[in-house]
Image (tube, grey):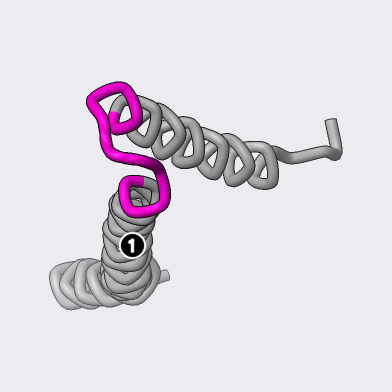
């Protein structure tokens, strides 16, 4: 059994050891997780911006291919919107988990 005079020293060692354990097991993994999450959000933002640019390019190409006229522009917008929605639908469909 510990000597009563050693209890403050043992208590201090226990607190220091607990703090070190918490730092190693919670703070360090949280920092790594934050880095990976930031990279994921950045990648998602870049891919989303690329998708928007692809839809705009499709709209521009359709405007050049279709004849001049107000209704042809409306058709180009509709086809570009359907193309973007279709691409988004394919991405969502492929992301779903089939194991259920």
* Quarter the N terminus occupies: bottom left
Q: Position of residue 83 (x, y in %)?
A: 50, 40
Q: Is residue 68 magenta?
A: yes
**Residue topped by disc 1:** 50
Q: Is 23 drawn above or below residue 26 in the view shown?
A: below
Q: Position of residue 67 (x, y in %)?
A: 36, 41
At horizontal 31% and vertical 25% (from top left) the residue drawn is 74
At horizontal 67% and vertical 37% (from top left) the residue drawn is 93
84 displayed left or right of 86:
left
At horizontal 41% and vertical 52% (from top left) the residue drawn is 65
Q: Which residues are magenta?
A: 63-73
At horizontal 39% and vertical 48% (from top left) the residue drawn is 62
- Tell me which corner region of the image, top left, top right, bottom left or bottom right, holds residue 70: top left
Q: Main secondary structure of the magenta part?
A: helix
Of residues 96 and 70, the one nearer the viewer is: 70
Q: Position of residue 23 (x, y in %)?
A: 27, 72
Q: Is residue 16 magenta?
A: no
Of residues 73 and 89, the one nearer the viewer is: 73
Of residues 94 and 87, the one nearer the viewer is: 87
Q: Position of residue 76 (x, y in %)?
A: 37, 36
Question: Within 10 Å of the Cα at label 1, are there few (<14), some (14-19), or many (20+) other Cα atoms?
Answer: few
Is residue 3 something that shows in the picture?
Answer: no
**SS type, badge 1:** helix
96 displayed left or right of 84:
right
Q: Is 53 drawn above or below residue 70 in the view shown?
A: below
- Tell me which corner region of the image, top left, top right, bottom left or bottom right, holds residue 78: top left
Is residue 28 something that shows in the picture?
Answer: yes
């Amino acid at each position: 059994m510990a000597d009563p005079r050693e209890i403050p020293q043992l208590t201090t060692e226990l607190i220091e050891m607990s703090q070190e354990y918490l730092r190693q097991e919670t703070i360090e993994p949280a920092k790594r997780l934050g880095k990976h999450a930031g990279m994921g959000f950045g990648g998602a933002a870049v891919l989303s911006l690329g998708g928007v640019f692809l839809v705009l390019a499709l709209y521009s190409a359709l405007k050049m291919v279709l004849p001049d006229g107000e209704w042809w522009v409306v058709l180009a917008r509709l086809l570009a919107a359907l193309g973007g929605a279709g691409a988004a639908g394919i991405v969502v469909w492929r992301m779903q988990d089939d194991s259920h």
